[in-house]
Image (cartoon, rainbow, N blue to C red):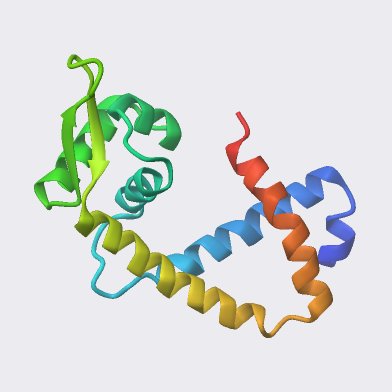
Amino acid sequence: MPTVEKVARTDSGLASELRMSVMRLRRRLAVERHPDNDLSLNAMAVLSGLHRFGDLTVGELATRERVQPPSMTRTVTCLEDDGYVRRRRHESDGRVVVVEITDLGRQTVLTDRRRRDEWLARRLKDLTPDERAVLREAAPILERLANAE
């Protein structure tokens, strides 16, 4: 079986290695979620988006999360029923409904994020300074890939 270094020399090999590594890391970080948090990863993504970007419409949330608006409406309804978000009329256009995160939603995001960041920070300490430097350089590139159309 070829080594990672040899497979990743081609763009398609690199794509395969990145896909597998990112998916494994995502699964590992999902395991590190706060034990009291029983929200789905999709619901947490919605809360995180509202925390990061502020109030958004259901359509904007659907676009950001790459899901259909009816699916996002169901997610938002569940989050609203549990007190994580609330819907309100837009300040300047009363026809538009925006979704805003509540204090409970914000606290849930911060608690969950802190737990997973702490786990990852402990793992990063096991790396060499050079390896951490490579990851510092790679982080914005991975973000750009994640946001690409």
Q: Is residue 57 visible?
A: yes
Q: Quadrant of the C terminus?
A: top right
Q: Is residue 1 visible?
A: no
x and y percent of residue 125 in the render? Answer: 66, 83
What residue is drawn where x is 61% and y is 80%? Answer: 123
- Taking depth in this image into account, of 32 and 86 the one nearest to the observer is 86
Q: Which residue is situated farthest in the left direction here?
A: 81
x and y percent of residue 139 in the render? Answer: 68, 56
Location of residue 4 with respect to 140 vertically, above or below:
below
- Taking depth in this image into account, of 15 and 82 the one nearest to the observer is 82
What residue is drawn where x is 79% and y is 81%? Answer: 128
Indicate the quadrant where residue 39 lies.
Answer: bottom left
What residue is drawn where x is 25% and y is 29%? Answer: 98
Location of residue 108 with respect to 144 vertically, above or below:
below
x and y percent of residue 107 in the render? Answer: 28, 63
Indicate the quadrant where residue 57 lies.
Answer: top left
